[in-house]
Amino acid sequence: MLRRSLLVVMLVLAPSLLFGATLQERTQLFFGHDDRTALPIDQTPWNAVARIQLGEENQCSGILLAPHWVLTAGHCLLDAQRHRLWPITLELAGLPDKQWDVDAVRYPDSLRRGLQPDGDSFIITPEASPRDFALLHLSQPVSQIAPIPLWPGDTKKLSSVLMNKNTRIALAGYPEDHLTQLMGDLGCQQVKYAGDGLLTHRCDSLPGDSGAPLLLQTQSGWHVVGVQSSAPDAENRWQADNLAVAIPFWKKQLQAWLR
């Protein structure tokens, strides 16, 4: 079970709050070294990664789960007063010249209650952290890009897979230093199932990567195993790893919404 002391230092990657990190701060956030690379947007699964623009400085990432549905972080859709925000634009990496309208949003009601206002943003409490996910419904289905399915196993199976030294997890998104270029860490370090619906990890990420998928490649293809949620600020980097929502923990809820 994840210690409360680890969780309380976690700050939400609110897209507008932490934009503008210095080079030194980014190096700290990257655990001392930037392992990201630019990803080919004409290839699976990278072409299914979404860029979600919610304002002039508010941007998050996501992944196409089904022709009508994009998965992202729930906090991306709430402002500092916990009012709902609607995506202004949603683009898919493989179709950069096309924008998609969002006509419905679904996230756990308990997420909003667990966000504590903190100036121009908020802190995700330990109670809210595992619930930081959302689905965006597209008004028109996507037919040109193959969706990336959810991991089919349960949390016990995922925990076992993550303990295998040969397992490789990738995180792909649109970080603040490459707002229109898809970037990814293809060899995420120390990805662990922490219990209570959370993954801890050391994927290199920045503001803008909130909602980015954690992806696992298996013999049957790529699967979504997590959604990037939060990270400590640079000065607290070595006190805690990043947090992501563990998809298997919420698979039944997501599958019900996808129907």
Image (spheres, helix red, strand yellow):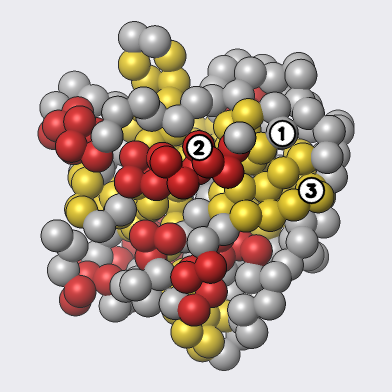
Closer to the camera, 53 or 23? 53
Q: Amino acid at mark 2?
A: Gln
Circle 2 sits in a helix, a strand or a loop, which is it? Answer: helix
Circle 1 sits in a helix, a strand or a loop, which is it? Answer: loop
Closer to the camera, 180 or 83? 83
Q: Position of residue 54 (x, y in %)?
A: 75, 61
Residue drawn at x 69%, y 64% as measured from the top left: 58
Q: Earlier in the sequence, mark 3 or mark 2?
A: 3
Compared across the picture, whether 108 is left or right of 146 comes to left
Q: Amino acid at mark 1?
A: His
Compared across the picture, whether 246 is left or right of 253 comes to left
Residue drawn at x 33%, y 32% as measured from the top left: 169
- The disc label shown at residue 68, or none: 1
Closer to the camera, 100 or 21? 100
Give the mark toward the camera: 1 or 2: 2
Q: Position of residue 161 (x, y in %)?
A: 19, 28
